[in-house]
Amino acid sequence: MEPLQKEEIEKAIQNLDGWEYNENAIHTKIEFKNFKEAFSAMTRIAFEAEAQAHHPEWTNVYNQLEISLSTHDAGGVTQKDIEMATTIETLLFN
């Protein structure tokens, strides 16, 4: 899979709330009411990540979750990352 061009990435994430492109990945930061909600969201995302065979790089501190997506073996952001970000948006906000 080939990495997307910067313009393609920026266009794709326009439809995703809170995502930005920098450092060769797309990133978002989400704040929840508490740790339990943050961990629950991570669990839902983990099942989808496993189903898509595409896993986020993330950190969690109490009620905050930071997610970065990049296809490492392609050397940048690919359509797989856009699809995973879209899945995350759907899981958490729809």
Image (cartoon, rainbow, N blue to C red):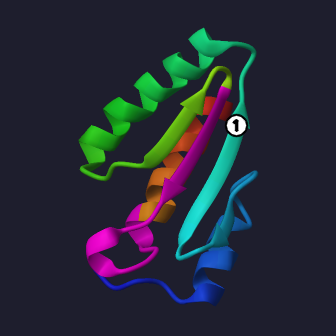
Relative depth, front residue between 11 and 46: 46
> Could you tell me residue 45's position as x and y percent?
44, 34
> Could you tell me residue 78's position as x and y percent?
42, 74
> For the view shown, which residue lies furthest in the front direction?
61
Q: Residue at x 53, y 42 (%)?
A: 88
Relative depth, front residue between 59 and 7: 59
Q: Is residue 65 above or below residue 12?
A: above
Q: Residue at x 46, y 74 (%)?
A: 77
Mark 1 packing: few (<14 Cα in 10 Å), some, or many (20+)? some
Q: Where on the picture, by quarter, is residue 89?
A: top right
Looking at the rendering, the stretch of residues picked out in magenta corresponds to: 64-80
**Image quarter hosting the N terminus:** bottom left
Instruction: Answer left or right for 83 relative to 22.
Output: left
Magenta residue check for 70 = yes
> Could you tell me residue 51's position as x and y percent?
26, 41
Magenta residue check for 76 = yes
Instruction: Answer left or right for 37 relative to 43.
Output: right
Q: Residue at x 33, y 85 (%)?
A: 2
> Could you tell me residue 94's position as x and y percent?
65, 32
Instruction: Answer left or right for 11 relative to 73.
Output: right
For residue 94, say whether it is visible. no
Q: Residue at x 51, y 19 (%)?
A: 39
Query: Secondary structure beneath disc 1?
Result: strand
Q: Where on the picture, by quarter, is residue 30?
A: top right
Tell me the amino acid under the disc marked 1: Ile
Relative depth, front residue between 90 and 36: 36
Q: Which residue is mark 1?
A: 30
Q: Is residue 31 above or below residue 72?
A: above
